[in-house]
Amino acid sequence: MKNLFRANNIPALIVCIVHMTVIYFVSLYISQEPVISILTAIGIYAVIIAIAVSPVGEFLFRVCCGGRKIRVNEWQTKVNSALRNVILNTERNNIYVPNNIRVYYVYDAFPTSFSVGRSVCLSSALLDSSQQNIEACIAHELGHITAYDSVITALANAGNIVVLALGALLQSFYTFNNWTSRYSRSRSSDIRHLLAALLLGLPLIIVGIVLGVTRLVLNIGNRGKEYAADSFAVNIGYGQALKNALLIMDFDSQLNRRNLWQSIVASHPGVYDRVGRIDNLMNDNSNHIYSNSQLLDELSE
């Protein structure tokens, strides 16, 4: 569990603290009782944690992301062999991997992968590529799983959902109070009526700002996690395979066509930044030049 508190997870832990703070102030606004508000914030977040780390939470997040059981025999054969090989390589390097790792697929014409809890999700386009690419992506996702990246990301996302729901609740409460109290005020309070009307959307505006900032903070942490997961894959022998898979995923260089703002808010580093770091880890400074046609050929294998 020490990986849970590593540097790359600090942004997500900060987001969790922000969530608890927001829950506290929403509860305080409604109840006007600080002690009750603190207990409410702790209780709600305890429920969020329990759900996020449970099989039920993993199932819900996987379903929301479009994860499905693999029923195509060819895909299942590739996945079984790839997962077995990756786990054997982790064991050879004395690296602990949680039990019951399962692989699912999402329908996507773009080759990609992600993990939710102990579930690895591979896109249909990736499953149509070579087994080497599949093994490299599974190795990368196991890096996330062993570092508890998936758990803490699920926790942060669950917190975002709760904050959004509480914002909607607070908006309804605030609007109801405004409209019920306006008729009990004298005509001399027209300015206050106007000000209250202008501020009707304030709760949702505040929640929107909070969610935007927390998403930016999470993405900053996520970029470090991607480099760490790449390092995990390199350490168990998948450096070159991961380089090939990354280049295939970005065969038209779309992921690297970013302006300054896109680079700031991106959840993943650029492909060539990742490839460069993999080269350094492998002590390999040679450049592998791929044409689009070569990459498409590999993808269709």
Image: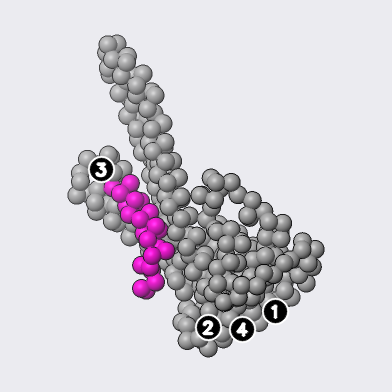
Mark 3 neighbour density, 10 Å: few (under 14) some (14–19) many (20 or more) = some
> 284 or 132, which lies in front?
284
In the image shown, does 162 or 6 lie closer to the viewer? 6
Report, in whole angstroms, how far the alpha carbon at label 4 lies from the one at label 1: 12 Å
Of helix, strand and loop, which one carries label 2? helix
Residue 108, quarter of the rendered image? bottom right
Q: Amino acid at mark 2?
A: Thr
**Mark 1 in CB contact with mark 3 (< 8 angstroms):** no
Residue 81 spot, x, y in % from top left: 66, 82
Quadrant where the C terminus is found in the figure: bottom right
Q: Which residues are magenta?
A: 1-24
Residue picked out by circle 4: 85
Residue 284, numbered label = none
Q: Is residue 158 visible?
A: no
Q: Which residue is mark 3?
A: 28
Q: Position of residue 46 (x, y in %)?
A: 33, 60
In depth, the one of 50 and 16 nearer the eye is 16
Give the CA separation, mark 1 to mark 2.
Answer: 20 Å
Q: CA distance from mark 4 to mark 2?
A: 9 Å
Amino acid type at mark 1: Thr
The circle on residue 77 is: 1
Residue at screen point 77% across, 63% down: 291
Instruction: Count residues near mark 1 (Cα–Cα under 10 Å), then give few for <14, some for 14-19, many for 20+.
Output: few
Across the whole image, how many numbered discs are drawn on residues?
Answer: 4
Q: Which residue is mark 2?
A: 90
Q: Is residue 214 left or right of residue 61?
A: left
- Seen from the viewer's position, the closer of residues 84 and 143 is 143
Residue 91 in the image: state x and y as whole percent: 51, 86
